[in-house]
């Protein structure tokens, strides 16, 4: 019998497995690679990227994981808040000046200044609420964040905006994979906090590309982590759990003292039919928004307008942010190397018209807009590849905070991990993976003859069944 089986080889599952690596464990990953929504590929000094790209650093769970695995990250060198809109490209200066530097009507400007002031004031309130407090569990901090402006949508919060003002707000809020009409006001404000204030967390790149982290953990686990292994069912037994999965055309049934379900919420719900009914209900209420992303490798030999930027918002385009993934490599060079690695993506309502189109059509639409913003861009491209994410991100909708106590309740033999348990994306994935692993380590450390010391409710065959 395994001490623990981890289902899902994304960042949450890999974080749990890394913490449990000295135990008898098995990790099952359905796809033919580790990483889930983290996916990058090396191209010489650069890497192409399609999923999670900016990460937390020292002082965070991600920082702890990176240090423990031996993978380096570095602050993103370029600006995070560029803007290309209405024929104007802005890559420097304070965001408050943007309404006056982008061509738009005075009505739009006035609406932007008014809504911008409201958002800025609440970004400051959010920063205070989101700041960690000594000794507190990440789940307590997370609940406080969910409760901040958590009962209305971002659209209701800023009020109706004229077209250009709306277009300028939308790319940032939509990066959470929900539209401003769907996302809670607090979550929308939180995203502006991330983009405007580097102390918000997600402002580091993993050197060599994000898959360096996930692949390194996968390699460290050796044959205890299987790719191409799809779990079909996880059920409780009296003093263990049973996992059924297929791998290499063979069906397997294995036992474990504990199981970590580190998939997306709907998959976790389907896999574990005997989870407590309120937990299954809560999992069923998590909503995901889609993403389409594309990575481009270029071959220019001279400086480009994007060189000093990392992220440029691109309202009214097929994609809504342009990322210079070569920014990190550029920060480490003494003379400009040829080429760049660029990612562009379309979340939420920008993804829906694209996600079922053939790759060529998606690329054509991206090229048309890229050529408008950076004339000649398509002629520089030597490689381009699209990726679709139907369950791109679980966004925070009004009332989401009320599900949190149920989803993070401890004591089951079958535990949940994954970014849907919080608002910090990869950081939540790592935190929830670590938390599940820590609960398992504590329970395993207790002799079997002292069931009263096991995780509450777990001893008698799992009281949460
Ligand atoms: C385009 C894009 C950009 C993003 N940018 C950022 C960013 O810059 N910063 C950031 O912090 N976050 C970002 N994110 C979010 C980030 O990628 C996720 O929060 C994080 O990777 C989620 O990790 P996870 O382990 O919770 O889930 P996942 O990565 O989804 O992992 C779940 C794993 O479970 C596997 N699985 C599913 N079913 C089964 C089964 N039956 N049996 C076995 N395995 C199964 C899946 O194949 C998958 O590998 C981005 C996401 C997208 C899509």
Image: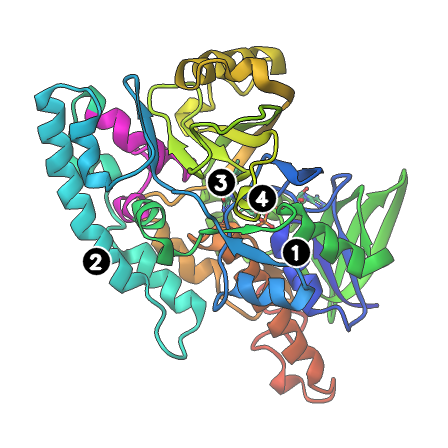
The vertical placement of 179 against 455, above or below, is: above
When asked about the image quadrant of residue 458, the answer is bottom right
Q: Nearer the viewer, residue 156 or 318?
A: 318
Can you tell which of label 3 and label 2 is closer to the viewer?
A: 2
> In whole angstroms, how far apart are the C-alphas of marks 3 and 2?
25 Å
> In whole angstroms, how far apart are the C-alphas of marks 3 and 4?
27 Å
**SS at circle 1:** helix
175 within the magenta span:
yes
The vertical placement of 61 against 379, above or below, is: below
State the predominant SS element of the stretch in magenta. Answer: helix
Q: Range of the magenta residues? A: 165-189
The C terminus, quarter of image:
bottom right
Residue 13's label in the rendered image is 1
Lateral position of residue 238 relative to residue 132, left or right: right
Q: Which residue is mark 3?
A: 393
Lateral position of residue 57 relative to residue 402, left or right: right
Colour scheme: rainbow
Residue at x 27% of width, y 33% of height: 169
Can you tell which of label 3 and label 4 is closer to the viewer?
A: 4
Can you tell which of label 2 and label 4 is closer to the viewer?
A: 4
């Amino acid at each position: 019998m395994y001490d623990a089986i981890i289902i899902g080889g994304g960042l949450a599952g890999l974080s749990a497995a890394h913490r449990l690596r000295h135990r008898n464990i098995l990790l099952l990953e359905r796809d033919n690679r580790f990483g889930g929504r983290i996916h990058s590929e090396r191209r010489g000094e650069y890497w192409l990227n399609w999923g999670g790209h900016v990460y937390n650093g020292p002082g965070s769970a991600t920082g702890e994981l990176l240090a423990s695995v031996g993978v380096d990250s570095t602050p993103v060198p370029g600006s995070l808040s560029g803007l290309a809109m209405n024929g104007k490209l802005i890559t420097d200066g304070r965001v408050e000046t943007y309404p006056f530097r982008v061509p738009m009507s005075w009505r739009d400007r006035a609406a932007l200044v008014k809504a911008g002031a409201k958002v800025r004031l609440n970004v400051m309130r959010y920063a205070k609420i989101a700041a960690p407090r000594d000794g507190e569990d990440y789940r307590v901090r997370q609940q406080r964040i969910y409760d901040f402006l958590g009962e209305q949508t971002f659209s209701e919060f800023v009020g109706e905006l004229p077209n250009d003002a709306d277009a300028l707000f939308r790319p940032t809020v939509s990066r959470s994979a929900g539209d401003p009409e769907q996302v809670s006001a607090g979550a929308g404000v939180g995203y502006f906090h991330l983009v405007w204030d580097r102390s918000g967390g997600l402002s580091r790149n993993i050197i060599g590309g994000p898959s360096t982290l996930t692949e390194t953990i996968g390699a460290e686990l050796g044959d205890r982590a299987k790719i191409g292994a799809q779990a079909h069912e996880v059920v409780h037994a009296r003093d263990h759990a049973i996992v059924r999965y297929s791998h290499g055309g063979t069906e397997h049934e294995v036992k474990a003292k504990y199981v970590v379900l580190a998939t997306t919420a709907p998959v976790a719900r389907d896999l574990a039919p005997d989870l407590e009914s309120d937990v299954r209900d809560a999992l069923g209420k998590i909503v995901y928004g889609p993403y389409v992303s594309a990575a481009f490798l270029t071959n220019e030999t001279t400086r480009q307008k994007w060189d000093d930027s990392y992220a440029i918002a691109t309202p009214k385009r097929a994609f809504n942010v342009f990322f210079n993934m070569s920014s990190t490599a550029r920060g480490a060079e003494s003379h400009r190397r040829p080429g760049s690695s660029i990612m562009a993506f379309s979340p939420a309502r920008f993804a829906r018209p694209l996600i079922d189109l053939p790759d060529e059509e998606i690329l054509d639409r991206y090229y048309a807009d890229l050529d408008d913003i950076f004339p000649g861009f398509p002629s520089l491209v030597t490689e381009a590849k699209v990726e679709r994410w139907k369950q791109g991100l679980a966004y925070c909708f009004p009332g989401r905070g009320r599900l949190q106590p149920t989803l993070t309740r401890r004591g089951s033999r079958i535990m949940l991990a994954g970014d849907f348990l919080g608002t910090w994306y990869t950081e939540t994935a790592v935190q929830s993976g670590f938390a599940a692993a820590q609960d398992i380590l504590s329970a395993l450390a207790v002799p079997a003859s002292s069931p009263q010391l096991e995780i509450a409710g777990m001893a008698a065959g799992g009281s949460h069944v």
